[in-house]
């Protein structure tokens, strides 16, 4: 058996793993990345939020993204609860945009970039076992496509294994699934579909239907990604009398927007299915290890948060690992900072997605009821911490004591529902009273504040630490340059 060592072992070459690996290697540390597949490989999760641009700039790949030709995404279009509305991410004076990407190409771009930063990448290489010493991972056994086994020791393990959940499922045994989002997704690809005639340029269309909701994503190769999301119970009932394709095509027919886009198109791929994909690990980090991207948690495709959370967590993990290896912070400080930062970002999205689901007004009342968060879906203490900016901004939340689930969660979800309602009615703003306009603007500003990433500025420091990209990527203490 071949034996070797590295400073950081990254398991998984998707957006989270490639981002983390590239940024750590750029700081001068030895990084080995093991990816069990051979790239390019298929993956879902094609709609990217503008928040990813900040990470792309830190990585130095914004120009590569632009040059590749991915579909630019200037906003989103919703037909939700029978009410159509859309919004632009930016303004004429401050352009802001995301991308619609073919994930096989996007992920390949990120992995290739990691190589240019000095990451030693091994594709077709699976991490079979991890050796734990006193609760800390110390080495791993890798097997490549030829069956050759190697032992590799390391100082820090970054688990970017996605749904596989190497650490959470097999060693920590601490992944739990969300009760609120026990959904099933079915999707496929269309050729010769029309482009959305309304809404922002390149927008994703998100449309509720009586039994669930559908997405439609235009891709730069001319195809259309379109999927259906149903609650698991609804799906199980429908499967008693219909095939997967019948369920999917009936949904397309019932969705005015998707039906219009595909009425002259051809379904050119088999249906793909995923179920019970919303989960969270009890811990996102610990002695010598970090869970990034989907290895730590995944919510729901509704608001396209997957790649956002993957790249955000990758950047934060890279900063924490780099500062730990340089001796700027202790291992405990680093892991506690990372856990708190990523968990706050995840919990924020948890409430946003739940609130959005609660605005669903289709005929299927069960679907709406099923999206209510339960106490199993969040930690009261973490929920309160995650929304400290809202708590400091709303007078009626400042004095909450005791169990925050009794007051905080309903108020937060009400706030998001009111925000979305205000945005949807922008064509009525001219006839609204000044008082209602000011209330709506204030509420929207609070939503914008809480959707800013935690821990990336001194003002959003976590445990007295925040991420800084210059002059080197790492953690900075408040009061220190």
Image: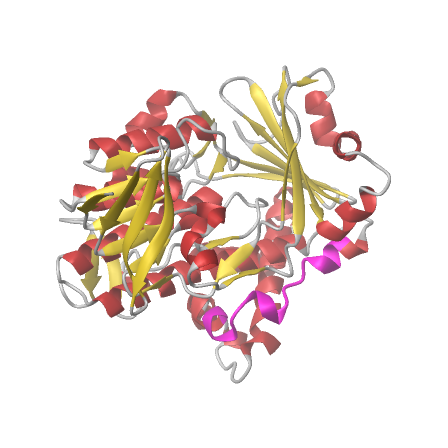
Q: Main secondary structure of the magenta part?
A: helix
Q: Nearer the viewer, residue 73 or 331?
A: 331
Residue 111 drawn above or below residue 67: below
Q: Which range of residues does the magenta coloring cover?
A: 367-383
x and y percent of residue 76 in the render? 56, 37
Please state if 250 lies on the left or on the right of 172 as rendered: right
Magenta run includes residue 377: yes
> Is residue 309 among what the camera can see?
no
Task: Give the residue displayed 60% in from the left and 63% down from the top.
Answer: 413
Q: Position of residue 172 (x, y in %)?
A: 43, 63
Q: Quadrant of the C terminus?
A: bottom left
- Reply above or below: 290 against 124: below
* Residue 36 falls inside the magenta stretch: no
Please tell me in which quadrant of the rendered image residue 93 appears.
top left
Q: Residue at x 59, y 38 (%)?
A: 86
Q: Residue at x 57, y 33 (%)?
A: 204
Total labels: the figure holds 0
Question: Farthest residue toward the right?
Answer: 241
């Amino acid at each position: 058996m071949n034996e070797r060592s590295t400073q950081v072992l990254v398991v998984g070459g998707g957006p989270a793993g490639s981002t983390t690996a590239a940024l750590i290697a750029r700081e001068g540390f030895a990084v080995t990345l093991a990816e069990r597949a051979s790239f390019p490989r298929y993956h879902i999760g094609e709609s990217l939020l503008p928040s990813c641009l900040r990470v792309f700039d830190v990585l130095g790949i914004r120009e590569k993204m632009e040059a590749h030709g991915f579909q630019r995404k200037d906003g989103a279009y919703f037909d939700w609860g029978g009410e159509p509305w859309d919004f632009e991410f930016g303004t004429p004076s401050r352009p802001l945009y995301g991308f619609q990407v073919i994930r096989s190409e996007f992920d390949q771009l990120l992995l290739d970039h990691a190589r240019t930063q000095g990451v030693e990448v091994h594709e077709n290489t699976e991490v079979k076992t991890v050796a734990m010493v006193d609760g800390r991972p110390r080495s791993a056994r890798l097997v490549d496509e030829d069956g050759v086994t190697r032992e590799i020791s390391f100082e820090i393990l970054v688990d970017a294994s996605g749904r596989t959940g190497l650490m959470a499922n097999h060693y920590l045994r601490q992944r739990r699934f969300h009760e609120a989002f026990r959904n099933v997704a079915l999707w496929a690809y269309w050729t010769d579909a029309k482009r959305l005639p309304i809404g922002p340029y390149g927008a994703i269309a998100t449309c509720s239907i009586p039994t669930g909701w559908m997405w439609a994503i235009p891709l730069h190769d001319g195809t259309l990604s379109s999927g259906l999301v149903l609650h698991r119970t609804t799906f199980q009932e429908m499967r008693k009398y219909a095939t997967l394709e019948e369920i999917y095509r009936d949904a397309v027919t019932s969705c005015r927007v998707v039906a219009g886009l595909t009425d002259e198109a051809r379904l050119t791929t088999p249906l793909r299915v995923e179920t019970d994909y919303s989960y969270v690990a009890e811990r996102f980090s610990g002695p010598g290890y970090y869970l990034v991207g989907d290895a730590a948690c995944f919510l729901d495709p509704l608001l396209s948060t997957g790649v956002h959370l993957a790249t955000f967590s990758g950047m934060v993990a890279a900063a924490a690992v780099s500062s730990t290896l340089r001796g700027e912070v202790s291992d405990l400080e680093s892991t506690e900072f990372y856990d708190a930062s990523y968990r706050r970002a995840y919990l924020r999205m948890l409430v946003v997605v739940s609130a959005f689901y609660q605005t669903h007004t289709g005929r299927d009342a069960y679907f709406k009821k099923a999206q209510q968060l339960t106490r199993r879906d969040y930690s009261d203490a973490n929920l309160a911490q995650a929304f400290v900016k809202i708590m400091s901004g709303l007078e009626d939340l400042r004095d909450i004591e005791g169990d925050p689930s009794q007051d905080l969660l309903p108020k937060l979800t009400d706030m998001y529902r009111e925000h979305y309602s205000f945005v949807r009615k922008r064509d009525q703003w001219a006839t609204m009273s000044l008082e209602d306009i000011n209330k709506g603007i204030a509420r929207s500003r609070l939503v914008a504040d809480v959707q800013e990433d935690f821990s990336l500025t001194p003002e959003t420091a976590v445990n007295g630490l925040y991420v800084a990209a210059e002059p080197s990527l790492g953690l900075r203490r408040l009061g220190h340059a």
